[in-house]
Amino acid sequence: MECCLELTEETDGSLIGLRVFECPLGHRTYRSKSNVSILLFRRSVEDETWHFVKECSQWPSRDFVESGILSSVVCSECIVRSRINA
């Protein structure tokens, strides 16, 4: 579920080239630099690592949870792939 409170952009919170927005309660959401859509993170139900690049070797395609809010560890392979494709 996504937080519906008003979001403000963090000026020093850039993560892997993404724009970071935060609500008054501290929930964060991430948008691409083009600001076209909210980036969705995905993780398998058995793992706590979140993925955001479909070409990642660990991208979950079944039994996964998807969210626009990041709450734990981000996949290092996704970070590397996002920098290569930037």
Image (cartoon, rainbow, N blue to C red):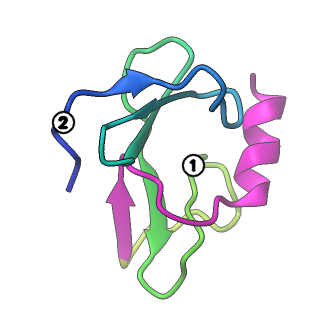
The crowd level at tag 1 (other Cα within 10 Å; few <14, some 14-19, many 20+) is: few
Give the percent coordinates (x, y) of residue 37. Answer: 36, 24
Give the label on residue 9, or none. Answer: none
Residue in front for this viewpoint, 77 or 71: 71
* Residue projecting furthest to the front: 24
In the rendered structure, the answer to whether residue 47 lies left or right of residue 77 reads left
Q: CA distance from mark 1 to mark 2?
A: 29 Å
Considering the numbered disc 1 on the image, is that residue within a helix, a strand or a loop? loop
* Residue that badge 1 annotates: 54
Considering the numbered disc 2 on the image, is that residue within a helix, a strand or a loop? loop
* Residue projecting furthest to the top: 34
Q: Quadrant of the C terminus?
A: top right
Give the percent coordinates (x, y) of residue 30. Answer: 47, 35
- Which stretch appears magenta? 64-86
Q: Residue at x 60, y 70 (%)?
A: 49
Give the percent coordinates (x, y) of residue 42. Answer: 46, 60
Looking at the rendering, which quadrant does residue 74 occupy? bottom right
* Residue projecting furthest to the left: 4
Residue in front for this viewpoint, 21 or 62: 21
Amino acid beneath label 1: Lys
Say if the magenta span includes residue 45. no
For the image, the number of numbered tags is: 2
In the rendered structure, the answer to whether residue 31 lies left or right of residue 17 reads left
* Residue that badge 2 annotates: 5
Q: Residue at x 32, y 37 (%)?
A: 23
